Amino acid sequence: MVEWSDSERKTIASVWGKINVDKIGPQTLARVLIVYPWTQRYFGSFGNLSSASAVLANLKVANHGKTVLNALDKAVKNLDGIKATYSELSQLHCNTLNVDPDNFRLLADCLTIVVATSFRSEFNPAVQATWQKFLSVVVAALSSRYH
Amino acid sequence: MVEWTDAERKAIKDVWGKLKGDIIGPQALARCLIVYPWTQRYFGSFGSLSDAAAIMANKKVAAHGKVVLNGLGRAVQSMDDIKNTYAPLSVLHSEKLHVDPDNFRLLGDCLTIVVASQLGRSFTPDIQAAWQKFLAVVVSALGKQYH
């Protein structure tokens, strides 16, 4: 089971507390679709994704970005039970959505970059280390029911 | 051979032009040693790396960070010939330094985060895509001579 130090728990709660989901969620998902264009295959019903500006202006992308980032709240509130927390979401992504779990890591990377652009020097190395540990646990949990 | 659009060339040179090598290099290497602690094994002669504060204050880390980033400058000046530009460095890292080439990607990721935190919102998705493509080519070139 994952061990969290008091300092890590505090850091994760603090970073999460400063994240504006309505802004960061859309930016993150947009970056995934722009930087890793194959991920657009999962969003065939979202309309125009033909260029970076189209992706950034796309309302369905924005809404779905909020949905995805809001789901991270459950992990933040449940650091000691992330695997169980995401068990159903993992099954959904595997069995129904057929998402390659490699993409969870790509989304996590884009989220980290958006957080870095927003928080700037506050996103110092120690905070980065804790945040990346947290996201890697989330990514592992989302992959845990794949078969 | 890698193809670069005019927009990509411009994005990469613009980003490079804004980076202060003396600051960015040390920060990127320090983050690598903090976020991926196993990388410290390559720097046994660098003195105290015992915690984040020690790493950030370590002069040998800072000096070596500058060396690494100056090395990246050669790729920026030689975008159409990165593979050959880095052939001797690749041989060096494989045969003398025995560095696991996976670590090049980790350092690249840390560099991207430092760049993101320095440039803030001006590190747009398009620019991120071009920058990551550039680093992927660099990482591939550094791993090319491994056997």
Image: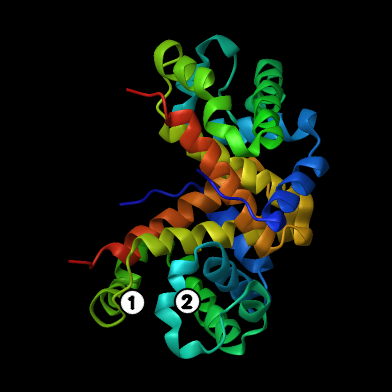
Residue B99 position within the rendered picture, expressed as x and y whole percent measured from the top left: 43, 22
Residue sitting nearer the eye, B29 or B122: B122
Residue shown at the point (51%, 73%) measured from the top left: A73
Label 1 Cα neighbours within 10 Å, binned few <14 / some 14-19 / many ≥20: some
Q: Is residue A6 above or below residue A147?
A: above
Q: Amino acid at mark 2?
A: Ala
Q: What x and y, as percent, mark residue B114?
A: 68, 44
> Disc 1 designates what residue?
A89
Q: Are marks 2 and 1 in contact (CB under 8 Å)?
A: yes
Dividing the picture into quarters, in which one does residue B71 lie?
A: top right
Residue B101 position by quadrant: top left
Q: Quadrant of the C terminus of chain A?
A: bottom left
The reply to whether residue B105 is in sight is: yes
Where does the image place residue A101, in percent across and percent down from the top left?
Answer: 33, 64
Residue B35 appears in view: no
Q: Residues within 10 Å of mark 2 (few under 14, many from 20)?
A: few
Disc 1 secondary structure class: helix
Q: Is residue B98 above or below residue B81?
A: above
Q: Nearer the viewer, residue A20 or B20?
A: B20
Residue labelled with disc 2: A71
What chain does mark 2 sit on?
A: A
Taking the spot 42% from the left edge, 29% from the top edge, the residue there is B144
B144 and A109: which is toward the camera: B144
Side of B102 where B108 appears, left or right = right
Report which quarter residue A91 is drawn in: bottom left
Question: At 57% across and 79% down in the image, what residue appears?
Answer: A50
